[in-house]
Image (cartoon, rainbow, N blue to C red):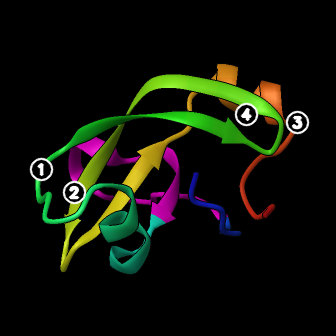
Amino acid sequence: MISYTTLIEKFGDKGEKTGWTYILIPSEVAKKIKPGIKKSFRVKGLLDKFKIKGFSLLPMGEGDFIMPLNGEIRKGIKKNVGKK
C-alpha cells in the first residue's frame, strides 16, 4: 500500500469541477499505484483510518491525478479543506 501526506484542496472556478473538494495524487505517487496509466482508475485503501473502495482517481495532466472527496469521506476522516 502506498502512503503519503497531502493537503485537502477545493477548486474555485474550474468548469465542471467548480467547488469540488479533492486531494492531489502527484505523478510520482500515481506511478507507484498503477504504472503507465493516464486515464481514470479506481482505488481502495485507507484515508487516515477511513476505508475507501471503488473511488476513482481522475487525470489532471502532466501525470498528476485527483481524488474527489465527497461528504461521506470528509465526514469519515473528520477533515475538510486545508487539512492534511
Q: Residue furthest right?
A: 78
SS label for mark 4: helix
Residue range of the region highlighted in magenta in the rendering: 8-24
Q: Nearer the viewer, mark 1 or mark 3?
A: 1
Q: Amino acid at mark 3?
A: Lys
- Disc 3: CA contacts within 10 A as few (<14), some (14-19) or many (>=20): few
Question: Is 48 within the magenta?
Answer: no
Residue 75 visible in the current orientation: yes
Q: Amino acid at mark 2?
A: Pro
Pointer 2 residue: 59
- Mark sitting on residue 74: 4
Q: Amino acid at mark 4?
A: Arg
Pointer 3 residue: 78
Q: Amino acid at mark 1?
A: Lys
Measure the C-alpha gap from mark 2 to mark 3.
Answer: 26 Å
Q: Position of residue 5 (x, y in %)?
A: 71, 69
23 or 19, nearer to the observer: 23
Measure the C-alpha gap from mark 4 to mark 2.
Answer: 21 Å
- Whichever of labels 4 and 1 marks the residue nearer the N terminus, that label is 1
Q: Quadrant of residue 36?
A: bottom left
SS label for mark 2: strand
SS label for mark 1: loop
- Whichever of labels 2 and 3 marks the residue nearer the N terminus, that label is 2
- Whichever of labels 1 and 2 marks the residue nearer the N terminus, that label is 1
Measure the C-alpha gap from mark 1 to mark 3.
Answer: 29 Å
Measure the C-alpha gap from mark 1 to mark 2.
Answer: 6 Å
Residue 19 visible in the current orientation: no
Pointer 1 residue: 39
Q: Nearer the viewer, mark 4 or mark 1?
A: 1
- Point out the image quarter for the C terminus: bottom right
- Disc 2: CA contacts within 10 A as few (<14), some (14-19) or many (>=20): many
What residue do we see at 30% from left, 69% from top?
A: 31
